Image (spheres, rainbow, N blue to C red):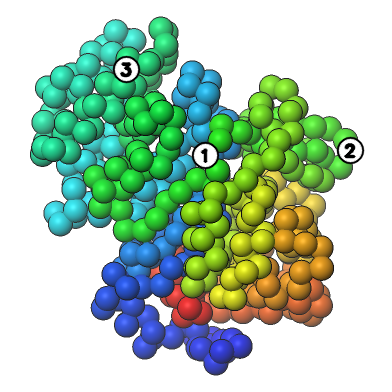
């Protein structure tokens, strides 16, 4: 096994450090991830074996899938990715709340008629559905209350096919608490015994827009991510936050002080794999993020995507790092040293399949050190092995 020594003479992996975390995960390190999608689901689950203090800042800008129905009906931030991460960090064992976990994981059938779907939802609110009957009080009453708020606000003709009950609970709570996410996220986290902190980078119902190198502008994350439609035909030149995905209305989003404090106090900051622009870059667009990162002296790590990300057409690893630093400096200041924003790129040059060749010399010229260590196993190929990735990150804290 390759062994890498980083600046603080910590070996990767560090078995002593990892065993200490595994024994007492309640006091494990606060590893912070700027992430938006489901790319870190298995990583998040693995993290809970070592720390219950990880921090996950997610983008609420998704404009496709089931989130689109809720966003259009209630003019709210997207909650799908937030719910996914909460579920990934939940304690679904007998010591947690497995009944709530099963309920929040349930999706309404896609082969039922609207009246039948409404009956299923009503049976949950009335406490008659088998899934809701399995939830002990007072949790059952709290869940029923949020679902009732959703039902009462649900517009006529709302499509419930495939709807996530977890998303409906979050939406009902959002409406119940005067369109604030924090109270329902706190309640949802307690109901599911979530082992970490999950927060949106901003709670405003904004969207993303990009401009390609040929000048074309695309509004809405679902139109350029390549997940729900054709991939974009050219390289992305710029990305910004807009009030609408139907009309270009650029706006400034600001992180609240509590989010800024989470960033500044983290024991390690990670820019993880995932959709590069709609996940990673989108998280650092709000004002205050770059400044908060620069104030934290903890290690900052970028983990490049394996394979080809549709949002990174024509980009080398060096291009990706330059782009990341550009958007961080847009808030932190153009003269802020790279070492205050990004220290390391961690990758596996032997087993990992990257979209462009790895040139350590070029990366060092950018002020970034390369950590080349096993991250892809025979079992996980062509993806990162969650266990190896988590152990590498925690060895740096």
In the rendering, at what x and y percent does residue 177 appear? 37, 31
Question: Which numbered dot is residue 203?
Answer: 1
On screen, 342 above or below 10? Answer: above
Q: Is residue 324 visible?
A: no
Seen from the viewer's position, the closer of residues 241 and 316 is 241
Q: Residue 262 has which mark?
A: none
Numbered disc total: 3
Q: Residue at x 56, y 89 (%)?
A: 8
Which residue is the site of mark 2? 214
The residue shown at (69%, 40%) is 252
Q: Secondary structure at mark 3?
A: helix
- In this rendering, the answer to whether 114 lies above or below 138 is above
Q: Nearer the viewer, mark 2 or mark 1?
A: 1
How crowded is the residue under tag 2: few (<14 C-alpha within 10 Å), some, or many (20+)?
A: few
Left of 164 or right of it: where is 386?
Answer: right
Residue at figure coordinates x 55%, y 57% from the top left: 260
Q: Can you identify the residue that label 3 sits on?
A: 151
Q: Quick one: label 3 or label 2, which is nearer the N terminus? A: 3
Left or right, 128 with reference to 283: left
Within the image, what quadrant is residue 390 found in?
A: bottom left
- Between the C-alphas of marks 2 and 1, the distance is 32 Å
């Amino acid at each position: 096994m390759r062994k890498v020594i980083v600046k603080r003479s910590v070996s990767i992996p560090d078995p002593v450090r990892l065993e200490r975390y595994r024994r007492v995960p309640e006091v494990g390190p606060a590893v912070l991830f700027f992430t938006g999608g489901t790319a870190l689901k298995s990583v998040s689950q693995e993290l809970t074996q070592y720390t219950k203090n990880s921090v996950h800042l997610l983008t609420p800008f998704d404009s496709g899938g089931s989130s689109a129905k809720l966003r259009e009906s209630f003019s709210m931030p997207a909650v799908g990715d937030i719910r996914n991460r909460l579920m990934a960090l939940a304690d679904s064992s007998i010591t947690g709340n497995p009944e709530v976990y099963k309920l929040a994981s349930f999706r309404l059938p896609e082969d039922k008629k609207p009246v039948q779907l409404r009956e299923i939802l009503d049976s949950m609110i009335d406490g008659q559905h088998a899934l809701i009957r399995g939830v002990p009080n007072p949790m059952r009453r709290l869940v029923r209350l949020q679902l009732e708020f959703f039902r009462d606000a649900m517009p006529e003709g709302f499509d419930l096919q495939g709807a996530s009950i977890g998303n409906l609970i979050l939406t009902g709570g959002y409406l119940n608490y005067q369109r604030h996410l924090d109270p329902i996220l706190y309640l949802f986290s307690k109901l599911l015994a979530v082992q970490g902190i999950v927060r949106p980078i901003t709670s405003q119902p904004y969207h993303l827009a990009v401009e390609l190198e040929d000048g074309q502008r695309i509004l809405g994350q679902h139109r350029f991510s390549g997940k729900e439609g054709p991939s974009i035909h050219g390289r992305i030149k710029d990305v910004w936050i807009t009030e609408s995905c139907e009309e270009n209305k650029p706006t400034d989003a600001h992180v609240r002080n509590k989010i800024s404090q989470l960033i500044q106090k983290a024991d390690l900051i990670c820019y993880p794999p995932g959709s590069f622009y709609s996940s990673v870059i989108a998280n650092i667009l709000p004002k205050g993020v770059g400044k908060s990162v620069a104030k934290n002296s903890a290690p900052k790590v970028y983990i490049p995507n394996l394979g080809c990300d549709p949002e990174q057409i024509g980009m080398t690893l060096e291009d990706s790092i330059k782009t990341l630093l550009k958007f961080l400096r847009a808030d932190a200041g153009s003269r802020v040293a790279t070492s205050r924003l990004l220290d390391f790129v961690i990758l596996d040059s032997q087993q990992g399949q990257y979209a462009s060749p790895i040139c350590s010399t070029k990366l060092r010229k950018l002020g970034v050190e390369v950590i080349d260590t096993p991250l892809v196993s025979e079992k996980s190929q062509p993806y990162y092995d969650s266990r190896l990735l988590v152990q590498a990150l925690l060895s740096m804290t």
